[in-house]
Amino acid sequence: MSEIQSPLQIPLKHLLLLILCLIPDSSGQDMVSYGYIGERTDISCQYPPKLASKTKDFCKVCERGLCNVIATGPGQRFGFQDNRSDKLATLTLRRVADGDSGVYKCGFSTDGDRVDIKTIQFWELSNIGYEGGEVTFRCTYAQGFQTKAKYFYKKDTASPNTLIETKAGQTSQVDGRVSLQDHTNARVFTVTLQELTAQDSGKYSCGMIRGQNEPDHLSERRLAVKSVTTVSGHLGGFLKIACPYQNEEESRGTKRFCRGKDPVKCLQEGSVDGDRFTLNDSTSATEGVFTVTIKDLRAEDAGIYWCVEFGEAGPEFTSAVDLEVYTK
């Protein structure tokens, strides 16, 4: 039997390896969530039945590694709900803002200590659309604004044609390309821009009229319109799609190819992989592309896809792909 060595007897390089193996890997996240800046979104955490009676909360990890509990309730930007029948704790961001990206933990307290249930990586996103497509802004408002007029305009232009307004609970439309609809029951008005062009990129404002001698309530939205490439293939055949990098220095970052017109839903629900879809990231970074190969094309493969890369600032949608499948 070999003699057990003390730490002082273990070679330094082996001791370092031992230490590294004992340190928990904090980089992996239990789940990922996304939300558009300026809009309302939820971060949800499923917990086991035995924790139903426990008091839950959410905290956000700061740079020093501490997790600061998030204040929730009336008057706060965050709301909280614990649905004990569904075993679901939900943190509501009433208005996603710059700086909300980060690592969140849901947990509960026991014997004076906080115990983590789940870790969530949250990324904030600007609204994203593709040329020829459409995008919908969702502008939520507080109780009491149901009877107020709403409006929407692009901030970096003085043209009055960019202003669209509507009375409470009504729908307005400009040139058939822009429409605003007020949903008073849900306390949200939606603005849809169709037939997007690169010139539509920029900053916009959702506005609500408070009343006489009071400043209007404004909230900013940002829109980035990306290029779209149309590719086509025959039923049963195969197809190669070149996706561009946005930042060559981050060429070793994670790449994704997902399906769906709405980027958030695309990332959350539409990632494509498996036997028929393969992603090759071995291309030299100087070429600025990664390649997606689709084989055994099917009619249901047709639709909009997004090329995505992940950097330190989160996901970057580099371009859209409109896939057509010919059946003959």
Image: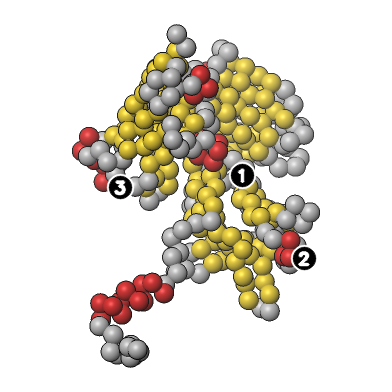
Q: How crowded is mark 2: few (under 14 residues within 10 Å), some or many (20 or more)?
A: few
Task: Name which residue type carries label 1.
Answer: Thr
Give the CA distance from mark 3 to mark 1.
30 Å
Q: Where is residue 184 in the image (x, y as percent from the top left)?
A: 75, 32
Q: Which of marks 3 and 1 is in front?
A: 3
Q: How crowded is mark 3: few (under 14 residues within 10 Å), some or many (20 or more)?
A: some
Q: In this view, does 116 lie above or below 88?
A: below
Q: What element carries label 2?
A: loop
Query: Residue 252: which disc?
Result: 3
- Quick one: SS at disc 3? loop
The residue positioned 62% from the left and 72% from the top of the image is 114
Q: Identify which amino acid the numbered label 2 is placed on.
A: Ser
**Residue at position x 25%, y 83% in the image:** 11
- Residue 287 image position (x, y, % from top left): 22, 34
Query: Residue under circle 1?
Result: 41
Residue 247 vs 91, above or below: the answer is above
x then y, percent, for residue 61: 51, 63
Dot 1: what SS?
strand
Locate residue 241: give its quadrant: top left
